[in-house]
Image: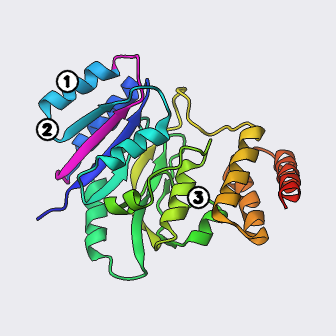
Amino acid sequence: MDLLITVYIPTFNRLSLLKRAVDSVLSQSYENFELIIVDDCSTDGTQEYLKNLVSIDSRIKYFLKEKNSGACTSRNIAIENANGQLITGLDDDDYFLSDRLERFIRCWDSKAHNNIIALTSGYQKSNTSSLRNKPMLIKQKDLLFGNFVGNQIFTETKTLQYLKGFDANLKMWQDLDMWYRVLSLGNIQKIPHATYFFDTSHLLGRISEAKESKIFETTNYFVEKHKLTPFEKRMLNNHLYSYGVLKSKDQFANICKEINKIFRLIR
């Protein structure tokens, strides 16, 4: 019997992009899935669209939040209500290639070594022609150098439920923090196929540019939460620059100086 996969999409006021994301899930070659969409109080017709979807496809579930509270809480609502043995996410401004779930389930069935707790895949960016699909085995320490996992994983639903979902206290890097905790339970295998389209072409507010104050706060919180050693903290500082959060070497130097001040005060 095919395993049920939960796909979840958090959304807020991106109806045109959401339709594309939903269509990409409904077009999957692997059909035993449920799609959970959590609406963060949209005002652009999203609610009417989702009500209609639910009425015509029993695989789709729709949750409307009582108040706007961000994507983290939306993801957590989906995780709490997931019925699938396996789970993966999709941002409302991205979309799946048609064989994503099928490739994941095949690899999941064959994984039996390297202490694999989750899978991820390569992806294609809308502003480049290259496919980022190099296979690799990702361990927890690797995330201090860069987010080699990406913004989605494929894992057992009970894993995300056990970890209590995403941390809504974080102002950014909620995915990095989640994967860091997942990696405390095992390794993540990146499969050698680009099955996710990461859209950076639109102007509807992708989270990629952060104010320095938000970077200070997030880095400090992450270091304290995970009790990073001084060496690990230095690696994370380098990750800030290489990951693209910091746009210049001068900004990187300023961030490192400010973070070190904070830690001297704490200690």
Q: Nearer the viewer, residue 200 or 117?
A: 117
**Which quarter of the rendering shows the C terminus?**
bottom right
**Which quarter of the rendering shows the N terminus?**
bottom left
Q: Residue furthest bottom?
A: 113
Decide: is 16 above or below 266: above
Residue placed under numbered mark 3 in the picture: 147
Pair 1/3: label in front: 1
**Which residue type carries mark 3?**
Asn
Dot 2 falls on a residue whose secondary structure is loop
Q: Nearer the viewer, residue 218 or 142?
A: 218
Quick check: can you spot residue 149? no
**Which residue type carries mark 1?**
Asn
The numbered mark, 1 or 2, whose residue comes first in the sequence reads 1
Q: Residue 39 appears in which quarter of the rendering? A: top left
Quick check: can you spot residue 141? yes
Dot 1 falls on a residue whose secondary structure is helix
**Mark 2 neighbour class, 10 Å CA radius: few under 14, some 14 to 19, many 20 or more:** few
Q: Residue at x 27, y 33 (%)?
A: 62
The numbered mark, 1 or 3, whose residue comes first in the sequence reads 1
Asked whether, in this view, residue 248 is left or right of residue 187, the answer is: right
Residue placed under numbered mark 1 in the picture: 52
Q: Nearer the viewer, residue 181 or 105?
A: 181
Q: Which residues are magenta?
A: 30-45
Decide: is 58 above or below 239: above
**Mark 3 neighbour class, 10 Å CA radius: few under 14, some 14 to 19, many 20 or more:** some
**Which residue type carries mark 2?**
Ser
Q: CA distance from mark 1 to mark 3?
A: 37 Å
Coordinates of residue 136 in the picture (x, y in percent) = 49, 71
Callout 1 touching callout 3 (CB < 8 Å): no
Residue placed under numbered mark 2 in the picture: 58
The numbered mark, 2 or 3, whose residue comes first in the sequence reads 2
